[in-house]
Amino acid sequence: MRASRNLAVIFSLLIAGAIARAQQDPMYTMYMWNTLSVNPGYAGSSDLLTITGLARQQWAGLDGAPSTQTLTLHSPLRNNSLGVGLSVVHDEVGPINNTLLFADFAYRIRVTQNARLAFGLKAGVDLFHADLASVPGTDANDPLFQQNIGSNAKPNFGFGVYYWSHKGYLGISAPKLMQHDLLGVDDGTVTVNAITQKRHYFVTGGYVFTLSPAVKFRPSFLVKAVDGAPLGIDLTANFLLAERLWIGAAYRNEDSMAGILAYNITQQFRAGYSYDFTLSPLKTQQSGSHELMLQYDFRFNKEKTLSPRYF
């Protein structure tokens, strides 16, 4: 009975965390600067070698709250029809650690003089680990919680289609098509699959409007569909002032509102920060979510690249 109660407690904690985050995959407020993590068709779209680092601390002040670090790099190849990239994501929620290592490939077709269409593939491995022995409030003599469960590698692959021009973009993707049982526990009588990896579908888009010589307006959106979770919708409005300063706001349905601030330190280097104000019942238990972004473009041939970049 004690083992059953402990199982119920830990499974409730893990499942609640997964559902609150729309099933395992990390969320980002500054997704418009982190497109490669959800759509491999984005690889090489900037016609530059671009490196982006992003760190997010969700629900600050809440023990075991989600923490995510992402590093992506991507570039076109010499023939200009292919783009390649690399995505590394480390995600931690309570006793669960998940590291994703993925390679990205995109085949690009010129649709018009200023627009292209890319078909992308993503392939890699999901390194999953659950340290149940670290969960507080359990019986130290219970052998069930004197072990680490998980520590295994799950291969996966995905696809994406990405269309973009100088002023706008639209993408659809499913970055992880395979659905694995990530965590299962056998208490001697029954095996329980506490977390099953769900397939996520993303639709992203955005456009840049010139309001004046010194002001541009860039609305964007991200829609996420997952089996067993409500449809996730992010709506974002950013203003670019004097081609340097980004000021914006975002809304995530039934979850949060956010403020966004980014600055183009040079034509190659930009930094951004966002702060989320939680709208869910968790708002009384934590102090919001923080996200930091750093991005650098390596410009080897300035004549063939656009400056500044809008997405």
Image: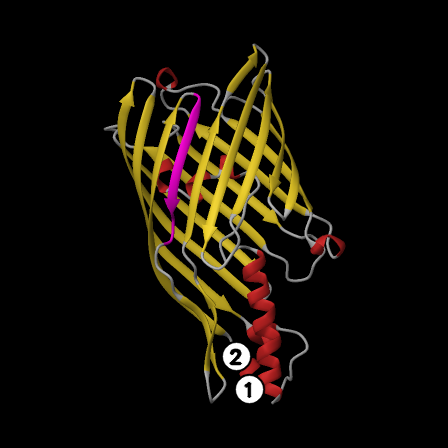
| Identity of the residue drawn at 58% across and 76% down | 133
Q: Main secondary structure of the magenta part?
A: strand
Q: Which residues are magenta?
A: 167-176
| Identity of the residue drawn at 36% across and 42% down | 40
In the picture shown, does residue 74 fall above or below 126? above
In the picture shown, does residue 245 fall above or below 141? above
Q: Where is residue 163 drawn, in percent x and y?
A: 36, 31
Separation of marks 2 and 1 at Cα, in angstroms: 7 Å
**Residue contact between numbered discs 2 and 1, judged by CB atoms under 8 Å:** yes
Which corner quadrant of the image does residue 92 belong to? Answer: bottom right
The amino acid at mark 1 is Pro
Instruction: Tell me how the rendering is colored.
Output: secondary structure
Compare residues 203 and 131 and report the one nearer the observer.
203
Name the quarter where the N terminus is drawn: bottom right
Q: Where is residue 263 drawn, in percent x and y?
A: 60, 27
| Number of numbered discs | 2
Residue annotated with mark 1: 143
Q: Is residue 153 magenta?
A: no
Residue annotated with mark 2: 147
Q: Judge the density around disc 1: few (<14), some (14-19), many (≥20) Cα neighbours within 10 Å.
A: few
In the image: residue 177, left or right of residue 28 = left
Considering the numbered disc 2 on the image, is that residue within a helix, a strand or a loop?
loop
The amino acid at mark 2 is Gln
